[in-house]
Amino acid sequence: MSTVSKYNRIAPIYELIDLPLEFFFFREWRKEALSGLSGKILEVGVGTGRNLKYYPAGCRVIGIDKSERMLRRAQEKAESRKNITLYPMDAERLEFPDNSFDYVVITFVLCTIPDPVKALKEMRRVLKPSGELIALEHVHSDYPIVDFIEHLINPILFFLLGDHATRHTVKNIEKAGFTIKEAKKLAFKDVFRKIRAKP
């Protein structure tokens, strides 16, 4: 089953699956990362739209996702916001011109994209030279015991969610041609990171 099929299937219960993480960690990280942004923003992998309420009213947000059912949930949250537009689209083939956005935002998405480097190259292409990539991601850990646990749960996460727990995401961002400005450790040693990068 493809990752898109998995997300279409779990869309109705997706927000329940990671509710504890959302309550204790993610919502604060989202708020801190997004509430100060401005200009034109692309959110790749908008999912059920959990980030949407944290964007300032003055910015223009375009959100994309490959799963139509997840997007439908996001649309419900976006209805009251005139500055948000959502489209079904593949992160590996972004349908926007070069140098279109001031920011590209990704939160817990690079673990599920089949070819993350290809998608990141597309994100770099659509970012303005002065723009910035902002990512909240779970990544491969450099701590042996955490790395062991990640490898242990990886097959389960992939089966259920198409989620890779062992990706070297910071390196992948660099491989796509970005310069890392920040890779802040947020929780569980170095598993959850806030990454800021310039094209």
Image: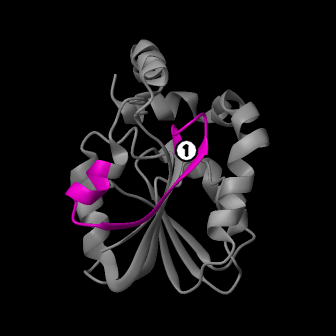
- Residue 40: give x, y in percent of width and height: 50, 83
Query: Which residues lie in the magenta part?
Result: 171-192
- Is 173 colored magenta in this rendering? yes
- Is 187 colored magenta in this rendering? yes
Towards the viewer: 75 or 172: 172
Residue at numbered disc 1: 70
* Residue located at (39% from left, 15% from top): 155
Q: Is residue 111 left or right of residue 19?
A: left
Identify whether 179 is placed above or below 138: below
- Residue 19: give x, y in percent of width and height: 73, 34
Q: Is residue 188 left or right of residue 99?
A: right
* Residue located at (59% from left, 84% from top): 38
Q: Does residue 76 appear anywhere in the picture?
A: no
Q: Does residue 56 appear anywhere in the picture?
A: yes
Q: Amino acid at mark 1?
A: Met
- Residue 68: give x, y in percent of width and height: 48, 46
